[in-house]
Image (spheres, grey):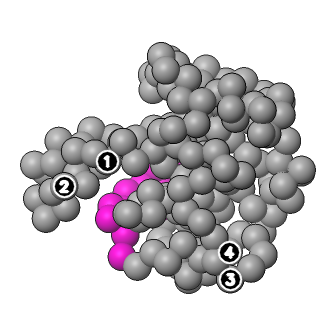
């Protein structure tokens, strides 16, 4: 990642919750790998990351609508939290959770970005970040002050990653 700021919410003009599978393929080219996930009702496609100077580039689509749910971007280097919060102009995480391997995941609103850490704390480098579909948060966007247990937010599945990261938001 080069530069002093990044646009949260889209990658190469592809936006979660808006862009279709067909539009994504038109922009990113044919996927190199296709993974179906029966649990999350998503399909993941891995695209040519080298074309964008990345380690990996994974786009998840809803099976029913074929709309982008999230875009997982793996930069060539792992960066610290401060760089990402500066690039995305993110301050305090909306939600923090750990995946099944104990690695920290933080979600930032209104940027709709998740940071996935290499370890269990935010002192670990960020391995990758995800642009998220804002509609996943529609039940909480109007009620951020509502206690987490009352938000009715069940969760967001992210990954076809080693040790698939599942965030359970309360």
In front: label 4 or label 3 = 3
Q: Does the segment drawn in magenta span residue 104?
A: yes
**Where residue 12 sits in the image (x, y, percent)?**
71, 52
- Please tell me in which quadrant of the rendered image residue 76 appears: bottom right
**Residue to which mark 4 is pinned:** 79
Q: Does the segment drawn in magenta span residue 163?
A: no
**Residue to which mark 3 is pinned:** 4
Q: Is residue 6 above or below residue 99?
A: below
User: Helix, strand, or loop for circle 3?
Assistant: loop
Residue at mark 2 to residue at mark 4: CA–CA distance: 32 Å
Query: Looking at the rendered structure, which numbered label has been put on residue 137?
Result: 1
In front: label 4 or label 1 = 1
**Closer to the camera in the image, 166 or 29:** 29
- Left or right of 10: which side holds 31? right
Residue at coordinates 86% horizontally, 59% vertically from top-left? 53
- Left or right of 149: which side holds 61? right
* Residues tagged 4 and 1 counted as in contact (Cβ below 8 A): no
Question: Which segment is the magenta one?
Answer: 92-106
Q: Of marks 2 and 1, which one's residue comes earlier in the chain?
A: 1
**Closer to the camera in the image, 57 or 170:** 57
User: Helix, strand, or loop for circle 4?
Assistant: loop
User: Helix, strand, or loop for circle 1?
Assistant: helix
* Residues tagged 4 and 3 counted as in contact (Cβ below 8 A): no
User: Helix, strand, or loop for circle 2?
Assistant: loop
Residue at coordinates 71% horizontally, 69% vertically from top-left? 78
């Amino acid at each position: 990642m080069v530069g002093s700021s990044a646009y949260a919410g889209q990658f190469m003009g592809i936006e979660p919750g808006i862009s279709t599978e067909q539009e994504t393929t038109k922009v990113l080219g044919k996927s190199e790998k296709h993974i179906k996930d029966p649990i999350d009702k998503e399909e993941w496609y891995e695209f040519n990351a080298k074309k964008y100077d990345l380690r990996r580039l994974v786009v998840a689509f809803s099976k029913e609508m074929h709309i982008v749910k999230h875009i997982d971007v793996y930069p060539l280097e792992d960066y610290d939290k401060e760089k990402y919060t500066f690039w995305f102009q993110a301050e305090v995480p909306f939600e923090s959770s750990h995946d099944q391997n104990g690695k920290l995941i933080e979600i930032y609103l209104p940027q709709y970005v998740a940071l996935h850490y290499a370890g269990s704390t935010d002192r670990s480098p960020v391995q990758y970040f995800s642009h998220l579909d804002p509609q996943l948060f529609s039940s909480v966007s109007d009620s951020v002050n509502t206690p987490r247990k009352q938000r009715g937010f069940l969760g967001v599945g992210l990954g076809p990653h080693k040790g698939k990261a599942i965030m359970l938001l309360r």
